[in-house]
Image (cartoon, coloured by chain):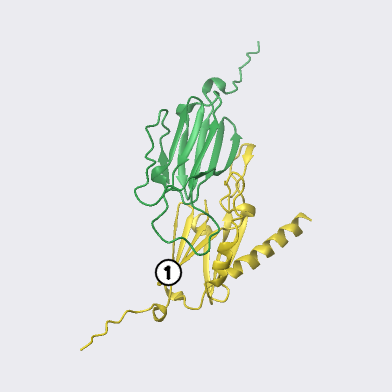
Amino acid sequence: MRKQEIQAKPEAIDNQCAAGAETGYVRPLVDIYEAGDVMTLVAEMPGLDEAKLQVSVEQGILSIEAPFCSADEAPPQHREFVRRGYRCKFHLPEVFDAQGISATVKEGILSLRLPKAQAAQARSIEVTVH
Amino acid sequence: MLRQNLLQEMGQIQRQFNQIFYGGGLAPMLARLTAPDTHEDACGGNQGRSQGRVAVNLREDAKGYYLEALLPGIEMEQLKLELTENVLSLSGAFNAEPLLDEEIAWHRRERPSGQFQRKIELPEDVDVEKVSADYHQGLLRVTLPKVPAAVPKKIAVQIR
């Protein structure tokens, strides 16, 4: 398992392919669910080149991007899928704490944990009964 | 009704994948290449994984056959790769439910879930003893070497 820091202001991604061609992007399939004070985003990115994965939050936009460079080999004679890079963007409402986002990648699945900011969490106010 | 449709769909897939290697030659594979690629939706997001099916690519060179399959999020213990006679079988389960005590509110749910199985009939010249597989970031690669007799050898002929 690999843990990555979310960068508030990412540096330029190295999008250049050393060998082979850059293959364009598809949007990964995602699950988004909320449990308690945490929103979880799960993105399927099979064949991901984890070294090129970049997750960032900038001006309320959560971006996931992982370019893919095709290998320098003959194309398959039988093809049912095309390997491409993955890219998607989401509006990140202000209720989420961008600094508190954590990400893990395992078996081609990116999991993002988005906690709500303290101020946005529902607070129960204790009532003192006299 | 739903169940029946599901089973029909699976039957179609079964026929489709059995054709990949059927007869052992490349002809069926090449015939399929000329068909338009119907495995991508408008946004291209499914990467050939609609209905939870396993998408495979197959390449052949002089030394062997190379199979790639998109299998994101499979625990190694959950992925079964079996070779019976000359049939390679891939099976396992996608996307187990998140195990949380709290109640879950779903906002988006696109990932397929459930069991999968795919059987592929191998050509006769596969050296079944030397089949190897590698799984990394949701991509399974299976290397199926050809039996040495099938690899053309270059023999230097000395002319005196």
Work out whether residue B6 or residue A15 is closer to the camera in this orientation and state it. Answer: A15
Q: Label 1: few (<14), some or many (≥20) within 10 Å? A: few
In the image, residue A90 lies at what x, y percent?
A: 55, 33
Q: Which residue is mark 1?
A: B61
Left or right side of B23 for B160: left
SS label for mark 1:
loop
Kindly identify the residue that appears in the image at 42 percent across and 79 percent down.
B150
Left or right side of A7 for B32: right
In the image, residue A29 lies at what x, y percent?
A: 57, 44
Name the colour assigned to chain B in the rendering. yellow
Q: Is residue A68 above or below residue B8?
A: above
Amino acid type of disc 1? Asp
In the image, residue A31 lies at what x, y percent?
A: 59, 41
Work out whether residue B68 or residue B113 is closer to the camera in this orientation and state it. Answer: B68
Work out whether residue A130 or residue B99 is closer to the camera in this orientation and state it. Answer: B99
Can see residue A75?
yes
Q: Which chain is green?
A: A
Can see residue B104?
no
Kindly identify the residue that appears in the image at 50 percent across and 50 percent down.
A46
Work out whether residue A45 or residue B21 is closer to the camera in this orientation and state it. Answer: B21
